[in-house]
Image (cartoon, grey):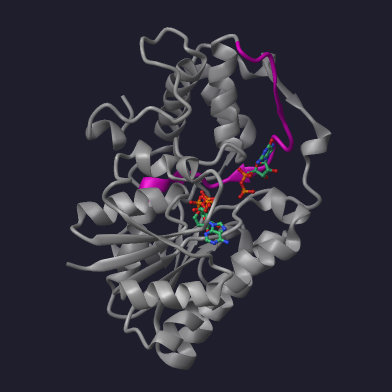
Amino acid sequence: MRRALITGITGQDGAYLAQLLLGLGYEVHGLVRRSASAGLARSRLIWLGIDEQVKLHDGDIVDLASLVRVLDRVRPQEIYNLAAQSFVQASWQQPCLTGLVTGLGAVNLLEAIRISGLDTRFYQASSSEMFGLSAQPRQCETTPFRPRSPYGAAKLYAHGMTVNYRESYGLHASSGILFNHESPLRGVEFVTRKITCAVARIKLGLQQKLRLGNLDARRDWGHARDYVRAMWLMLQQDSPADYVIATGRARSVREFCGLAFAYVGLDADDFVEVDRGLLRPADIDALTGDAAKAKAQLGWEPTIGFAEIVQEMVEADLRRTRELAGLGSDRPRACLPSKPTDSRSSQTMP
Ligand code: NDP
Ligand code: GDP
């Protein structure tokens, strides 16, 4: 049985990746940092119904000793480094922490692999944010990086070090340069989930307005379930490499709002207000990825379209909000999101 270790297993991608690997017959281990709210931290794994099937180990990506100890105990054949301070906006408020966790954290893990002498494959969660203010309309693996945020700069350092360990030590280290990807498990601070939560609350009469920042920002939004499959495919290749993972089509925040409100029969213009306080010190106007290399070499293509993503997220938030508010449901109030009702619904929400 193959063994994989996922850092960031409690996050959106970590949970979906764990589900994918379990389905492929892997023994799945995860690194989890200590929290006073440990029960909540596992909510995504619980939502997918896999919390009992993964083995969790205490550790922190900034604590090299804890990483060496966990690697020694688990001895994984594959390591997926998804742990990060992943929210761009917060990286201006916490630039040092972002550098420590998102940047140096990856190097801690690479060093832990080298120190423990493990023959393992390594995946680094790189980001389209590294492209930043790109001069090219579509970004691919050879596009120059010009990060626009402390988060983008930290990811670029981790990316460069992943390439460096590959070239210096022959480590099978691959980097996935992933464009934005969403799902019902996306953190509520990201714009897509902020919108779908608000749509549900407004539809149910619990909220009046939705305040957003830059409505004209364009992102290439895919679905997390598609994107974790690409991570796994990268580590199945004979040789390590870097790959852009994207849909190739960008939409604006305004378009996302329009579709999400329309799904519940409302007009976004009646509810969305621009709050200048939510504008970023430096934003990226548009990001659009070119995943031709991933298609040619990994056989990877996205399978879930934009409208389907919006629909799945709105439906999930309507269900969760109804439950939390005790509206129109005979279930007891729950602080955790409801589980999908059957195995198919975790693939496509009914
Ligand atoms: P999330 O924010 O949902 O998850 C981040 C994970 O990192 C959580 O499990 C979090 O744990 C963990 N973490 C944070 N700090 C530490 C630490 N000091 N030690 C150990 N673990 C820590 O991110 P996503 O799942 O959306 O993204 C996964 C990765 O992919 C991230 O690295 C992100 O930056 C990157 N990425 C994401 C994209 C996207 O669109 N989703 C696009 C491109 C890259 P806890 O639950 O305790 O907070
Ligand atoms: P990011 O691409 O990783 O920064 O993902 P986000 O979902 O946080 O932001 C995507 C885009 O939406 C950025 O250009 C933001 O400026 C824009 N945006 C507009 N309003 C908001 C908001 O209220 N919250 C967030 N998170 N982003 C917003």
211 w.r.t. 173: above or below: above
> In this view of the protein, which residue sits in the foreground, 21 or 56?
56
**Which part of the image, by quadrant, shows the N terminus?**
bottom left
Residue 122 position in % (x across, y down): 40, 74
Residue occupying image coordinates x 42% and y 81%? 113
Residue 201 sits in which quadrant? top right
Residue 203 position in % (x across, y down): 55, 12
Q: Which residues are magenta?
A: 206-226
Q: Is residue 4 visible?
A: yes
Residue occupying image coordinates x 23% and y 33%? 344
Residue 218 shown in magenta: yes
**Which part of the image, by quadrant, shows the C terminus?**
top left
Residue 188 sits in which quadrant? top right
Q: Is residue 136 visible?
A: no
> In this view of the protein, which residue sits in the foreground, 239 or 81?
81
Residue occupying image coordinates x 47% and y 31%? 310
Residue 154 shown in magenta: no
Residue occupying image coordinates x 48% and y 51%? 248
Residue 58 sits in which quadrant? bottom left
Residue 107 position in % (x across, y down): 55, 77
